[in-house]
Amino acid sequence: MLEAYLDNSATTCVHPQVVQAMVAAMQENYGNPSSGHRRGQAAEQAVKKARGQVAQVLQVNPEEIYFTSGGTESNNWALRGITQARARQGRHLITTKVEHPSVLDVFRLLEEQGFTVTYIPVDKYGFVDLDALEASLTPETILVSTMYVNNEVGAIMPLLEISRLLKQKAPQAAWHVDAVQGFSKLQLEPHKLGIDLVSLSAHKIQGPKGSGALFARHDLHLPPLILGGGQEDGQRSGTENVPGIVGLGLAASIMWERRETAISHMAQLKERLRQRVLTEIPDTLANGPQDKGGAPYILNMSFAGVKGEVLLRALGDKGIYVSTGSACSSHHAHGSHVLKAMGLSQPMLDGALRFSFSPDNTLSEIDYVVDCLKEIVPKLRRIIAGR
């Protein structure tokens, strides 16, 4: 049976070179980076190299990169840390209605702690409403958090325009960007935009799970996350996950070096799937940006008259792996908060699937997926109509 893994926004297959580098970190450079002997020094150099690789992609100083266990930890550290540090300066926070759960859940917690949070709406394509953002900025605003690429529909947020607004209306506010879905695939230079904090993850870019990073501007004075042995410049104590860190650094470097050809290839895959589904399967809809402003590796589509969860399982029986939305909230039965914020009708919301691509996917896989959809969707519609 053929297989097609199109759930790369949930996680990716680790690149073979990354696997080799991680094995070497476990079997050769296995020393503790804090140890003074040769093996410890080798591990320390491996961590230093990875820090430089991540910093190079972002065009920042290596000292501004702190390794974490992933995007969720980075988001939590950034949001909870900066509000703790600046609580006396103001109590107003801003984010959008389409953020990842690891951002939205932190803001809900901060509301319980007495902060006021403004949730900015988005348009029908998933782009943040800049007018609403501008109107929400006040002298009391101490933090603004916006994602770079939406993980469900692929909307690329207008960071340049957001940057201009913040500089004009709220220069005192710290700006956090969740860049988990854009890092090393799309260009992002925090210093040029005035971004203070950026969350990153390895396993979205063919690196290992359990490895991520947080960029924090050098003069931000973010409170330490974990106290103890003083690792990560005293900001996140605990023996470093050297294999995971090595994997993140190399994965970022590989993806960044081949991003132009990879993006072109994934855009071709996305357009092939979108066009074939829209023309060959009735009552379907492509959600999110369709030309400018959309990530070329994420496609969200709705199939009217079909439940997304049922269609997902039917495709799984054919060796096709997709998702109904964010992997971190796929077990919740409330439907996509992103699609709701975009104003989708309930039938289209219920029948939504996310297809997300990697450089390793092929056009033949896309054609196989469409052929299976053409077989499965009408059958499911007939079953539902006959009830």
Image (cartoon, rainbow, N blue to C red):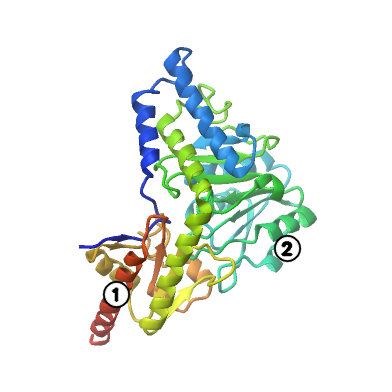
Question: Observer-nearest residue: 236 or 289?
Answer: 289
Any part of residue 336 in sight? no
Type of the residue with mark 2: Glu
Q: Secondary structure at mark 1?
A: helix
Q: Which residue is mark 1?
A: 371
Camera-side residue: 123 or 94?
123
Residue 136 vs 197, above or below: the answer is below
Side of 128 relative to 262 (left or right): right
Residue 158: image quadrant is bottom right
Q: Residue at x 48, y 27 (%)?
A: 46
What residue lies at 41% left-to-right and 68% top-to-bottom? 335
x, y percent for residue 44:
49, 23
Q: Quadrant of the N terminus?
A: bottom left
Q: Secondary structure at mark 2?
A: helix
**Residue found at x 37% / y 45%:** 14
Left or right relative to 207: residue 375 = left
Q: Hey, what amino acid is under mark 1?
A: Asp
Residue 108: give x, y in percent of width and height.
Answer: 54, 54
Task: Please state the horizontal and vertical placement of residue 312, each as a whole percent of the image.
Answer: 30, 67
Of the numbered discs 1 and 2, the one sitting upstream in the chain is 2
Above or below for 93 versus 23? below
- Give the residue pinned by disc 2: 134
- Graded by Cα atoms within 10 Å as few (under 14), some (14 to 19) or many (20 or more), the crowding at tag 1 reads some
